[in-house]
Amino acid sequence: MPITRTVLEVAAAHPDRPAIVGPDESLSYAGLVEDSRRVAAAVERLHAAATVPPVPAPETRGIPITAVSIGSAAHAARIVAGLAGYRAVSATIDPRWPLAHRLRVVLTTGIGLVVTDSEDLRDALAARGWGGTVVTPDEFRRIEREVEPAPPPTVRDDDEAFLLLFSSGTTSEPKAFLKTRRQYRANVAVSSAHLGPEPGVATLAPGPLSYSLTLYALIECLATGGEAHLADAFDPITMGQRIERERITRLVGVPAIAQALTDVARRDPARYATLDLVVTGGANLPASIRAGLAAVLPGVRLIGYYGAAEIGFIGDGRDGDGTRIHLYDGIDAQIRDETGAVLPDGALGTLWIHAAACSDGYLAATTDERLRDDGGWATVHDQGRLHGRTLELVGRAGDIAISGGHKIALTEVDRAFDGVPGIGAVSAVAEPHEQLGAVVALVLEGDAPDVETLRAHARERLAPQAVPRRWYRVDELPRTVGGKIRRGEVASLVRAGRVARL
């Protein structure tokens, strides 16, 4: 994996260059090399202390798994980065996941060591008779001070697993999968070619390390000799202060981060003079957010990338509403129907990707679902249309409604209301209909115009079958911890009658 080779090279050539910078602590590249020796030694001692050591999932080929589930992004980052040069698999578990999900991934994947500040997870593991080791962050630091440092980190074999990741955890049971060093080398090659991580570049990635966006930002920064500036949570005011103080040139996060940056930069745009690039992922980037940022900070580039944790970076959009994605070189795509047949350009169906960075598959202990077919093509069930090398992204299978034989992309209904004055966030859902099978309903957050105004707006922008038949409002739409609207839960609110009919 390039992270260890680059860390060692930068530590030798530029020992004082910042590697990991948190709100209250930082490590230089030389400091990271030395710190990793104590991290590795502490992890080895703690695994050895297990009463009945859990057997790691067979897909790891016997490599012990260490999980970090803590609130401090910087502390989690130095453990994950520190173990990258050793025979170890690291996992980051979001402490805000439901306890049942956190417990399940530990028990099913064979995690042997958990560093956590969550007492509920510690108690639940003890109640289940789990034989691994649990320590708090403070206990882990104490053991680091006590142990004899391990030998220096080394560049590991390409095919050795080093990261255990999860596909979900907020609304469904997580599926686990591994990333080998070879796969992540391919991922870093794509990212460094298109998304701006470069030697010495200061990247701020606010949010828990359990966010794939934050974790990938850490890895790509260290793999390219950049600076990874981390924050435990997303706070616009603190973010602005750190951009100015730490001379941040690159910002990575969900689309909401671009909106927040626009809002705070209006007060004092000069504070953001060092900022050159904002990279967003995890959801479509509305055109209104792009236009707003361009008006306030015209010198800042904005890239909305599309990818999947299992597959890697796939492509990006640099204009419009982020739904037209230009595929990166080396990424091949197909659209298939329900039978697996490849569809022609312009047809709506399931997206399949062939990429060198793709994981081999999900861990069998966590799901029987296949990620890849026999030809190496993979899908996470995103829906879209291909136009040559341009992908029109629609969403997941749950974002499609069938009404009177027509396939309707609910995300396209959402986008028809983006940026409309007097309308906040919206979520289109499918409601059952006796004759048509389903019809579209739109749920609006907060205050809403009258139905006739809404219907007239929709008719101007949508095909007749996609115009919502029913209209509702709710004080607050349900969201994931990352800020995405949970369409399935919105539909549940509608079915339960917990929304107001307009």
Image (cartoon, rainbow, N blue to C red):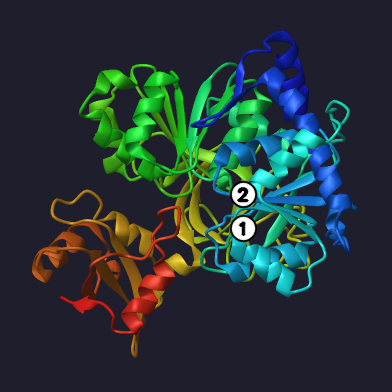
Q: Quadrant of the C terminus?
A: bottom left
> How busy is the neighbourhood of tag 1: few (under 14 within 10 Å), some, or many (20 plus)?
some
- Is any atom of residue 329 visible in this view? no
Number of dots carrying numbers: 2
Q: Residue furthest top?
A: 13
SS type, badge 2 = loop
Is 302 on the left-hand or right-hand side of 41?
A: left
The quarter holding residue 481 reads: bottom left
Q: Which mark is residue 454?
A: none
Q: Are marks 1 and 2 in contact (CB under 8 Å)?
A: yes
Q: Is residue 405 above or below residue 333?
A: below
Q: Is residue 386 above or below residue 55?
A: above
Question: x, y percentage for residue 449?
Answer: 11, 63
Is 123 on the left-hand or right-hand side of 4?
A: left
Q: Quadrant of the N terminus?
A: top right
Observer-nearest of 14 and 180? 14
Residue highlighted by disc 2: 309
Q: Residue at x 72, y 55 (%)?
A: 177
Q: Residue at x 49, y 35 (%)?
A: 205
The quarter holding residue 470 reads: bottom left
- Is any atom of residue 257 visible in this view? yes
Question: x, y percentage for residue 363?
Answer: 76, 61
Residue highlighted by disc 1: 167
Observer-nearest of 118 and 267? 118
Is 265 on the left-hand or right-hand side of 275?
A: left
Q: Amino acid at mark 2?
A: Ala
Question: x, y percentage for residue 394?
Answer: 44, 56
Observer-nearest of 341 and 104? 104
Marks 1 and 2, Cα distance to the nearest angstrom? Answer: 7 Å
Question: x, y percentage for residue 360?
Answer: 77, 53
